[in-house]
Amino acid sequence: MDRTLQDTADAALERAIRDRGARDPRDACRALLRHVRARDREAYERAVAYYEETLVPTTASGEAEPLEAWLDYARLVARTAAPGRTVEIDGAGVARDCVPPIPPDRLVLHLPDGGDPPALLVAQPATMTPAQEATCDLLLGGRVTLREAGERASG
């Protein structure tokens, strides 16, 4: 891949993160890619090809808004990992079907059909609310006990 194109795409994403006060989506995408690679090498290679042939060029050229493009990519990788539905969770913990554009304060999870894995993290806000943290605890970590005051969810 052309390094200049990659650098331009990275700079566009970093500007969008800064301007919207969003969390960097690349960590969640890397985790999803690791999950896909462990389960299906061909699906992983298709996801990498999409990154190189579509995500980077459209983000670098300005054709796609960087945060939306990365969210679309994360959703694609999650669907590749396991068929299911993707939901967004607002600050109150209410889940709705994920329909772009997604506000940066939403937690986005992919819920695989059949529950294996139980849920995949697609995107998370820069700061999660207690309801979003509880959702992560339950659906991502399988935790069903309450955290002590001041204890933060990992993610």
Image (cartoon, rainbow, N blue to C red):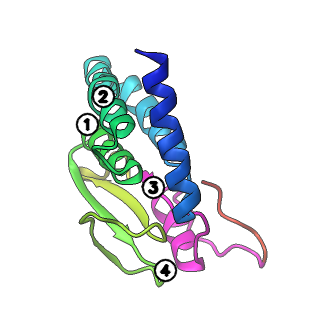
Q: Mark 1 or 2, which is nearer the eye?
A: 2
Give yes or no for contact between labels 1 and 4 (Cβ–Cβ under 8 Å): no
Residue type marked 3: Ala
Tell me what residue is drawn at x 44 percent, y 52 percent: 121
Mark 4–mark 2 Cα distance, whole angstroms, equals 30 Å
Residue type at mark 4? Gly
User: Residue 27 at what x, y percent from top left?
Assistant: 54, 42
> Relative to residue 150, is residue 81 drawn left or right?
left
Distance from disc 3 to disc 4, alpha carbons, whole Å, reads: 14 Å
User: Which quarter shows the C terminus?
Assistant: bottom right
Which residue in the protein does label 4 denote?
A: 91
| Residue name at image x 40 percent, y 61 percent | 108
- Determine whether the residue tagged by mark 1 lies in a helix, strand or loop: helix
- Which residue is denoted by mark 2 in the rendering? 47
Contact flag, marks 1 and 2 (Cβ < 8 Å)? yes
Element type at marker 4?
A: loop
Magenta span covers which residues? 121-149
**Residue plotted at (58% across, 77% down):** 129
Query: For the residues marked 1 and 4, what is the alpha-carbon distance in whole angstroms?
Result: 27 Å
Where is 31 relative to 41, above or below?
below
Q: Amino acid at mark 2?
A: Ala
Q: What residue is disc 3 on?
A: 123
Q: Quadrant of residue 102?
A: bottom left
Image location of residue 101, percent across then percent down:
30, 65
| Residue 65 disc label | none
Give the Cα distance between marks 1 and 2. 8 Å
Q: Is residue 146 magenta?
A: yes
Q: The residue under label 1 is which amino acid type?
A: Thr
> Is 77 above or below relative to 147?
above
Secondary element at image label 2: helix
